[in-house]
Amino acid sequence: MSKSQFLLDKNITFLNHGSFGACPKPIFDEFQRFQLELENDPVHFIQKKLPVYLKEAKKPLAKFIGCEMEDFFFTPNPTFAINTVMRSLNLQKDDEILTTNHEYGAMDRTWNFFCKKTGAKYIRQEIKLPIVSKEQIIEEFWKGYTSKTKVVFLNHISSSTALIFPVKEICDKAQELGLITIVDGAHVPGHIDLNITELNPDFYTGTLHKWMLAPKGSSFLYVKAAFQNDIDPLVVSWGYESLFPSESQFLDYQEYQGTQDVSQYLCTPKVIEFLETNNWEQISDDCKKIVRDNYQRFCDLVNTKPICPITDVFLGQMASIPIKTSKPMELKELLYTKYNIQIPVMPLNGSVYIRYSINAYNSQEDLEVLYQAIAAIINTTDLIEV
Ligand SMILES: Cc1ncc(COP(=O)(O)O)c(C=O)c1O
C-alpha cells in the first residue's frame, strides 16, 4: 500500500507508527463526515443519533477484540482507561501492585500518584535483557510476588523495548492466585492477535488509533462483568442517577461524560472494513518480516546485541535497537532535522533504545535511509558510541 493513501508528509521517512499511529485517507474522510454531520444539527446528533452510532461502532469492535459489546466502552486513550480503573481500586496501605520495569511512563506515573495517595506500593519487577525465553520473563516476574500482592499490571507490548509479553501465562497464574489483572494493550489491536475472552483479564485497555489506523483519541477499556458495578466514572455526568437508565448502569456511568466530539469512535466500522478489505493480516505479517530481517543488522551497525530472540514470539511491527548514547534527545533531533527521519530514541532503566516501526506505507528503502543516517552520525559526530 503506498504512502499516498495516508496523510503523512512525503518528505519525512516515517518510522514511528508506534507513538500515535497514522490514519489512511478513507478513514480520515469518514471521521470528518461525522464531524460535519454533528455540526449540521448538533442537538439532534448528540441526543438522538449518537447513542445509535455508538452501538453501531461497538458491535464490530467487540468481534474484533473478542468480547461482548456490553463489556467495554470507548476512552480517548489508555491513560484515561487506567486512571479510571486505578481510581476505583480499593487498595489499602502496603498492598502491592506487581508490574515490570518495561511499562509506559504515563502508566508508571499514574500508579505512583495512586500509591502516594493510598500508601499502596508499585513494584517494578526487573525483567532482564536480553530476553532468552518466555519462561525467563514469567519466572523473573513472579519473583516480585509477595503475600501483599493484590494486583498485576502488565503491558502486552512494551513501549521503549517493543517486546511482546507472555500476558496469557501471567494472567492465568494471577487468576489462580486470586489477583486482579489489568493489562495495558495499547499496542495490540490490529498488531498481534487479540481475543480478550480467551485472555481473560479483569481489565484490558487498547487503542484503535495506533495499529488499527483510527483517527487519534480512540481507545477502549474492557471490564469483566464481575467488576463493572465497582468502577466509578472518571468524570461524573448525566449517566449517574440517569433520568433514562439503560440496562447497564456500568455503561450509563461511563459512556456519557459531558459534551464531546467523539467522531473518532464512530469511524470504527469504517476502520475495521478498511483493515479487512485491504487484507491487513497479510500486510502486518509482511511488515513483521521486514522488522525481523533488519534487526540484527542494525544492532551490528551500532555494535550492540538484540534484546530478544528474533522471532514473532517477542517482535511484532516494531523493534528496539539498544544504542550507546549519552544524548538521546539530541540524537532524535538530529535524525529529524538533518535526515528527515521521524523515529523515537527512548531511555529506559539506564539504557537507550532507538525503535523503528514498520507499517504498510514503509518499505525496506526507509530502513536503508535510517541505516545510512546512523552510519553517517557514527562517522561524523560523537553522539553514538560504538
Ligand atoms: C505500553 C503503552 N501504554 C500506553 C500508551 C499510550 O498511552 P496514552 O495514549 O494514554 O498516552 C503507549 C503509547 O505508546 C504505550 O506504548
Image (spheres, grey):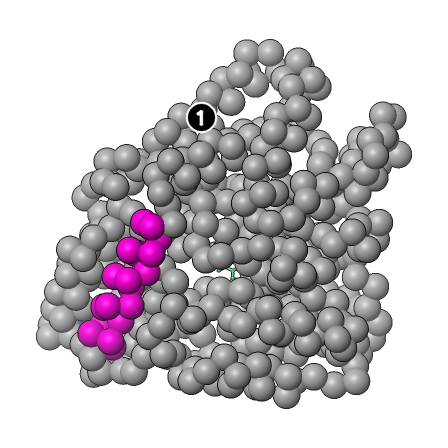
Q: Mark 1 points at which residue?
A: 30
Residue 278 is one of the magenta-drawn residues: no
**Picture residue at 59% right of the left edge, 68% below the top:** 168
Horizontally, residue 96 falls left or right of residue 336, namely right
266 shown above or below 45: below
Magenta span: 282-299
Q: Quadrant of residue 151?
A: bottom right
**Coordinates of residue 22 in the picture (x, y in percent):** 37, 43
Q: Which amino acid does label 1 sit on?
A: Glu
272 shown above or below 318: above
**Picture residue at 32% right of the left edge, 79% below the top:** 306
Q: In which quarter of the image is residue 319?
A: bottom left
Magenta stretch, main secondary structure class: helix
**Picture residue at 53% right of the left edge, 16% below the top:** 37
The foreground one among 360 and 79 is: 360
**Coordinates of residue 17 in the picture (x, y in percent):** 36, 52
The foreground one among 303 and 358 is: 358
The C terminus sits in image quarter: bottom left
